[in-house]
Amino acid sequence: MMRILLILFLFVSLPSFGQHEFMTWLNAGMDGKIVKNLKWEASACVRIGQAGAETIYPQVGLEYKVVKWFRPSLDYRFLIEKNKIGNYKTTNRLNVNLDFKHSYKRLGYGVRFRYQYAFNRISADAYDADFDQAVRIKPSLEYDLKGSKITPEISGELFYNPSFGPISPGFSKVRIAAGAKFNLKGPHTIGVKYQLDKKFRNFSAPLRHVIDLSYKFSF
């Protein structure tokens, strides 16, 4: 699956060489247990681009561990997005996630299926896979380095637009990322990753480069 995503990414990226967009995403969050197998999560994110803070959103969610390898979850996200003329607009979004994870020795692998539903979007521009209705498939790999607090990880993600339109339904975007988690002393975790995004069927869209920095506190 990861190899297929990489080939797709290279294929759709070739026409956009010379067109690049650079962003920094800053994430901070916390989580804790409500009862056995049920966990709450809360976080906030700021996505910074050439126009400053282009997207801001808080998010809250619940995750339930059915078995060790299967954890469904539900998230609510309130998005504040800057449009092309510099005004901010808002969107509400629900994410329904099915997260499957397993491990073999020190290698961890998994896949997340997500259905996202956006509602009450004000002054929407063209379809955007990050803000509108979408189905997402995200395989991932991580490796537990012996005697280290660093866990390298890679992931890929396909975005599918299920709505009916001139160029949909169909896959709308591909994303690949590589980075690491740093498990610090106590309940602190820091994450760093480099991410590339490219839209399908839109050769004028730039190739997006993202530096993603995250922090999590676990109660």
Image: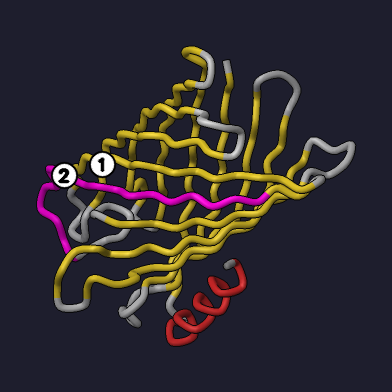
Q: How far apart are marks 2 and 1 (CA)?
A: 6 Å
2 or 1: tag closer to the N-terminus: 1
The residue that label 2 is drawn on is: 119
Percent of width and height locating residue 143: 76, 49
Residue name at image x 25 percent, y 41 percent: 93
Q: Relative to 171, say whether 117 is above or below.
A: above
Name the outermost residue toward the bottom: 15
Q: Where is residue 6 in the image (x, y as percent from the top left)?
A: 57, 73
Q: Which amino acid does label 2 sit on?
A: Phe
Q: Name the residue under label 1.
A: 93
Q: Position of residue 212 (x, y in %)?
A: 54, 48
Judged left or right of residue 56, residue 215 is: right
Q: Main secondary structure of the magenta part?
A: strand
Other-residue count near label 2 (Cα within 10 Å), few / some / many at <14 / 14–19 / ≥20: few
* Front residue of this view, candidates 86 and 60: 60
Q: Quadrant of residue 168?
A: bottom left
What's the residue at 66%, 54% (across, down)?
A: 141
Q: Give the range drawn in magenta.
A: 109-126
In the rendered structure, are the residues bearing label 2 and label 1 in contact, judged by CB atoms less than 8 Å apart?
yes
The stretch drawn in magenta includes residue 15: no
